[in-house]
Image: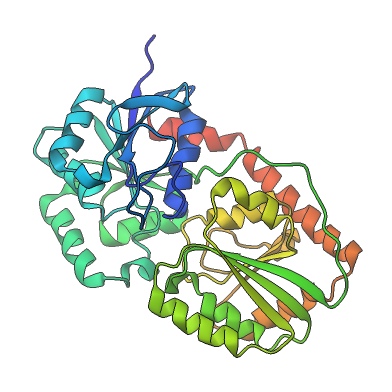
Amino acid sequence: MEKKRILVLVDWFAPGYKAGGPIQSCVNFSFAMKNDYSIYVLTTDTDHGETHPYTGITSGRWTNDMDPDIRVFYLEKTAVSAKRIREQIDAVHADYVYLNHMWSPLFVLYPLWLKFSGRLKGEIVLCPRGALYESALSVKRWKKKPILSLFRWLRLDKRILFHATNERERSAILQHLPGSRVLIADNLPNMHQPPFKSLPKERGNLRCIFIARIVPIKNLQFLLGALEKVKAEVKLSIIGPIEDQAYWKECTQKIAQLPANIKVDYLGPMRNDELMAILQHHHLFALPTTGENFGHSIFEALLAGRPVLISDQTPWLGLAGQKAGWDLPLADPDAFTRVIEDVAQQDQEVFDYWAQSAWTYAHKFIKNPELHGQYLKLFA
């Protein structure tokens, strides 16, 4: 019996990594579902913010070079058009078209128009991936509010199925698009966890790491402010592409004013397959984000067996009770300072206990048998 077809539409896909979580979500989805469905991915051949195509990929035709069971079509970024996207949508004859994020003109809004006009027959499943959270809507609100109004006016939200990755996202969807059909399926993480690996830990010293795009929503400045009052010796590594140059300039000014006991290294952007090793060379992952739909870098840190210090604006809550980390309110910046100081003062035994607990927390998540079943219901 031939498997049903899912066509994933996304602006950026592997080997890209500079667009952050949506890429990893779509890659993880493709690998997780390839045995149950025929997976097709339509994307572009150039990473976010780049002008040169990826090396080692074939543009302009369907290939299965990444995996025998996953077919990918890389459109030449310089020649992407509605016409070319429709040609490939028509060629696949997908039972389901899986859209990611909300605002992409060609990879979300145009397929929705095709559905509205009756020229797209497959069922559309749309995952906003956090785009309807207030923290995300506050950026370029002038552009997003008219699109939401158009959604409601054309009743597009009544023609599709929404995929929410948690209850918070479900509430956000229904707040802005009341009456929509919404199903919840947890975000699919990286399922490959290495064996637990410790790291030497001395009292009064800490290696901390921040992994995210350099934009205000990720809140690097907040973390730097929390470090200002720390008395221990701390080395902070920053990894991620600089998307907001003005914001980065403010961060560098703050870095220059940090006390001598706080050292900061900016390491630039890194591929996803490079992150595990560098995470294992740090004691604490820190990301005081103003909002995450999932937070793949957070989960990568847990997979690596490293406790995380994050805000309470992510799905990862109640971490302290699991001895896997801390999820704190942004209204209390001193709490972040206290945790950093406390972790810096941990000895080897205490650090290993928290690190092992973080590893176990991630292990239980990826072994949850309900995770795969949620997606089978979503595409049923």
| Residue at 72% from the left image edge and 85% from the top image edge | 230
Q: Which quadrant of the structure image shows residue 131?
A: bottom left
Between 165 and 207, the one lying in front of the other is: 207
Q: Residue furthest top?
A: 1
Please, which colouring scheme is shown? rainbow
| Residue at 45% from the left image edge and 67% from the top image edge | 242
Q: Residue furthest left?
A: 117
| Residue at 13% from the left image edge and 37% from the top image edge | 83
| 353 displayed left or right of 376 | right
Q: Is residue 121 visible?
A: no
| Residue 366 place in picture, x, y as percent | 63, 41
Q: Which quadrant of the structure image shows residue 145?
A: bottom left
| Residue 332 place in picture, x, y as percent | 59, 83
Q: Is residue 244 visible?
A: yes
| Residue 316 place in picture, x, y as percent | 59, 59
Image quadrant holding the C terminus, namely top left
Image quadrant holding the N terminus, namely top left
Between 250 and 57, the one lying in front of the other is: 57
Between 43 and 378, the one lying in front of the other is: 43
| 318 displayed left or right of 8 | right
| Residue 13 place in picture, x, y as percent | 40, 43
Is 51 above or below relative to 268? Answer: above
Q: Which quadrant of the structure image shows residue 183?
A: top left
| 240 displayed left or right of 79 | right
| 258 displayed left or right of 60 | right
Q: In this figure, what is the number of numbered marks?
A: 0
| Residue at 32% from the left image edge and 40% from the top image edge | 43
